[in-house]
Amino acid sequence: MEAIVKTNFNLPGQQDHYVGKVRDVYSIEGDYLVMVVSDRISAFDVVLPKGIPFKGQVLNQIAAKFLDATSDILPNWKIAVPDPMVTVGHKCEPFKVEMVIRGYLSGHAWREYKAGKRTICGVEMPEGMVENQKFPTPIITPTTKAAEGHDEDISKEEIIAQGIVSREDYEQLEAYTRAIFERGTEIAAKMGLILVDTKYEFGKKNGVIYLMDEIHTPDSSRYFYAEGYEERLAKGEKQKQLSKEFVREWLMANGFQGLEGQQVPEMTDEIVASITDRYIELYENITGEKFCKAEGENIEERIEKNVTEWLNNL
């Protein structure tokens, strides 16, 4: 099965075309965005050389489901899903920060903690914690939104002092972040999962704050299986998790962490197929629904046809 790693559509009303790490975004008449979630995969802020079939569909459909499930908390950018790999939505002016929220001491926060740091993004972390332990209260650890390269940790105070986001808007973003995370935590619990940490992006349109991009997908979030969590924690064992972390772990085991001079290990057909299988497993566990592969003779032609038809009916 082919992976879609590049698109170059000519859509009705198209003004420009932006290529991100994973998404190809088309601006339509200054008001709408067509976001194609490609099968590209990135880790350590590097786009890997091969795409992962069906990954784009998995991410797009999970995000659409969770945008709908949180739309009573705040407006979001989604208007329609004209193709399994595409969301069309409102064009917003993005805030130049990503709101990262952590319910547990994992990933980047744990690496900082293990190195002896007890403050991350200006937030104090308690002494005596172990990897994957639950924080007394979820902590918000924002990052700057880098156009290229690595996003950088930043504190609330620095964001406000540097005028990146006004105090009033930032405090609203924090409140929304906590509310969406709480909703995601409740939904995950019903699926036998723990929402460990995640990130959200927000923007403004006509003075209103919108939730943008994707939410609660395995690319932007980390999930643990709830069953056995306490036992594994007590024994100091790795948690069984649903996230893109398995890709990072495979890369690290093969000597790659995105550092200068390091080579991405060979992505064999077997490795690619196994990553596809994991993404489908993620989809089914996170949503509780069977994954239906959207196949066709030519995926790019299918996408362009579906999106063009939708735009022509605007």
Image (spheres, grey):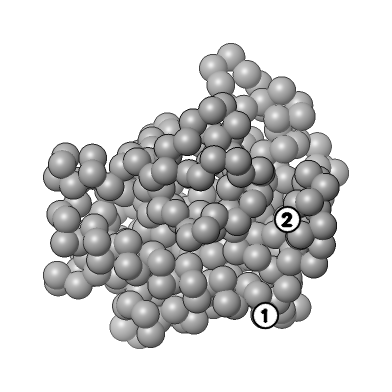
**Quadrant of residue 124 within the rendered picture:** top left
Residue at 70 percent of width and 43 percent of height: 247
**Mark 2 residue crowding within 10 angstroms, few (<14) / some (14–19) / many (20+):** many
SS type, badge 1: helix
13 is higher (above) or lower (below) than 82:
above
Tell me the quarter of the image containing the N terminus: bottom right
User: Can you name the residue that lies furthest to the right here?
Assistant: 270
Report whether 94 appears left or right of 253: left
Which residue is label 2 attached to? 241
Instruction: Point out which mark residue 190 bears.
Output: 1
Residue closest to the eye, 270 or 156: 156
The kind of residue on which mark 2 rests is: Gln
Estimate the x, y position of residue 176 in percent, counting from the top left: 34, 69
Answer with left or right where residue 254 lies relative to residue 307: right
Relative to 279, residue 97 above or below: above
- SS class, disc 2: strand
Query: Of label 2 and label 1, which has the lower sequence position?
Result: 1
The residue type indicated by label 1 comes to: Lys
- Residue 241 lies, in percent from the top left, at 73, 55
Q: In percent of the image, x 31 and y 42: which residue is there?
A: 155
Point out the residue furthest to the top here: 261
Q: Is residue 27 left or right of residue 71?
A: left
